[in-house]
Amino acid sequence: MDGAVVSTMVRRTRAETCKVPDLQRLESVNLKINIAQLSTELEILASFSDAPAPAVTRVVFSETDLRARRYVKELCANAELTVREDAVGNTFARWLGSEPELPAIGTGSHIDAIPNAGRYDGTVGVLAGLEAIRTLQRAGVRPRRSIELVLFTSEEPTRFGIGCLGSRLLSGTLDVAEARGLKDKEGRSLEEWRQAVGFAGDLRSVVLPRGHYAGFVELHIEQGPLLEQHGTALGVVTAIAAPSSLRIWIEGEGGHAGAVLMPSRRDALCAAAEITLALEAAARNSGAVDTVGTTGVCDVFPGAINSIPLRVRLEIDVRDIDEARRDSVLAHFRASCEEIAGRRRVAIRTEIINTDPPAACDKQIMVVLAAGAARHGLSCEYMVSRAYHDSLFMARVAPVAMLFIPCRGGFSHRPDEFASPQAIMNGALSLAEALAELAANKGIG
Ligand SMILES: [Zn+2]
């Protein structure tokens, strides 16, 4: 037995298979996803790109993004959904329920793509969400609650340097004054951008009223390799990890690399090296596999081979699904920084870039998702989302859950990102089942 097989088996035993209680099916319908149409729509959406195929580049508010939005809105109108856009361009397409005064069930994701990305990240959640709705329509389902498809603005941070812009504003997480001050690299503000592309109105109106959604489900490619390795059709997400990121300036003393002798050095880069390792140790010692710590940026000044580093800027990112554990890792890390600063006689200053609390998914919706998969004989397992998504912020205003489908090799944010039509169909089908169940259920939310 070779090493690869052994490691797959070890991982297999760790995967927690979804347990499904006996849910009473509310109505008996025969759901059939039109995968040919859905695949064509994904292909057409991918053609709205500023990079040559198979790469996709679609930065929020670019002409390409606007054309892609028009395409999605047209598809929604064809499905007789009522389309509404808010002041930042979040787009809602509603299928009216028989009791429209009840909080709705939401589903959706994003269609913006970082430079040189693939065609499935986000788009699967939007277009398979739409196909799930059309599937229910074709099957003659009459939802009690309205079902609403959402296209979030700027999940990717490419233009404004902050991810999940639309869902942060919807959930009231991002202060409106702070949002107005966001600028792109050319100094053009969010205010200028959104108005120039036709999203008018006060940004304050973006915040969702209380009880807008009784539940929200986001379908997404896994962006990691586990489902594929385990041979599992679907992942039901239990929690979404969130990053806390810091910028750290280390100031020592520069000098000639030949003339300053070792005992009198205050080398900022040597201190930065110890700090990087201290972060790694703090994350490793958290006691949980879900804690990760990364130093992703190291800028050295003056950056010359014959000059002792005077100043270093590090940028670090710590993630976990447990906020208290993440904070305790950061506390250990900060203590190490102080100790290193004292011993190496350098000054250290830290600044928080951002810190978002992780989110737990709603157990009731998780069970509904697992039951929907089981009805079609699809295997599923519980897993953590290590990337963050709009659902992280929607969790602040609604019970949320996420459904993952496998993607080849776990690759994402690159042109060879790939999810098979079968995987997409499995996701759309289970999502449709869940939306029907949740929209019929008065007791949720
Ligand atoms: Zn995404």
Image (cartoon, grey):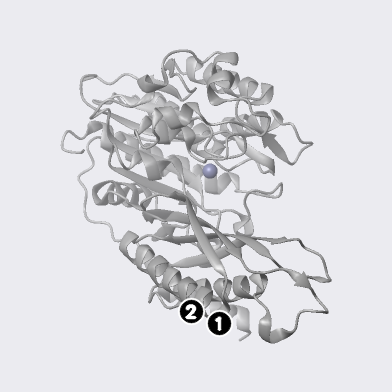
Q: Which residue ends up furthest to the left in the rendered image?
A: 443
Asked if labels 1 and 2 touch by Cβ distance under 8 angstroms, the answer is yes
Q: In which quarter of the image is residue 234?
A: bottom left
Residue type (three-letter) at the residue carrying disc 2: Val
Q: Is mark 1 on a helix, strand or loop?
A: helix
Q: Nearer the viewer, residue 274 or 143?
A: 274
Residue occupying the point 35% across, 34% down: 171
Can you identify the residue that label 2 sits on? 10
Residue occupying the point 21% across, 24% down: 102
> Can you say which quadrant of the picture contains the N terminus?
bottom right
Residue occupying the point 46% across, 45% down: 389
Q: Residue 188: percent from the left, percent from the top? A: 62, 25
For the residue carrying disc 1, how many other residues have a C-alpha within 10 Å: few (<14), some (14-19), or many (20+)?
A: few
Task: From this view, report whether residue 202 is shown above or below residue 257.
Answer: above
Task: From this view, report whether residue 76 is shown above or below residue 285.
Answer: above
Q: Left of 248 or right of it: where is 285?
A: left
Q: Nearer the viewer, residue 35 or 384?
A: 384
Q: Nearer the viewer, residue 289 or 410?
A: 289
Residue occupying the point 61% across, 70% down: 272
Can you identify the residue that label 1 sits on? 6
Residue type (three-letter) at the residue carrying disc 1: Val
For the residue carrying disc 2, how many other residues have a C-alpha within 10 Å: few (<14), some (14-19), or many (20+)?
A: few
Whether residue 289 is visible here, answered yes or no, is no
Q: Label for residue 183?
A: none
The span from disc 2 to disc 1 (Cα, nearest Å) is 6 Å
Q: Residue 175: percent from the left, percent from the top? A: 39, 32
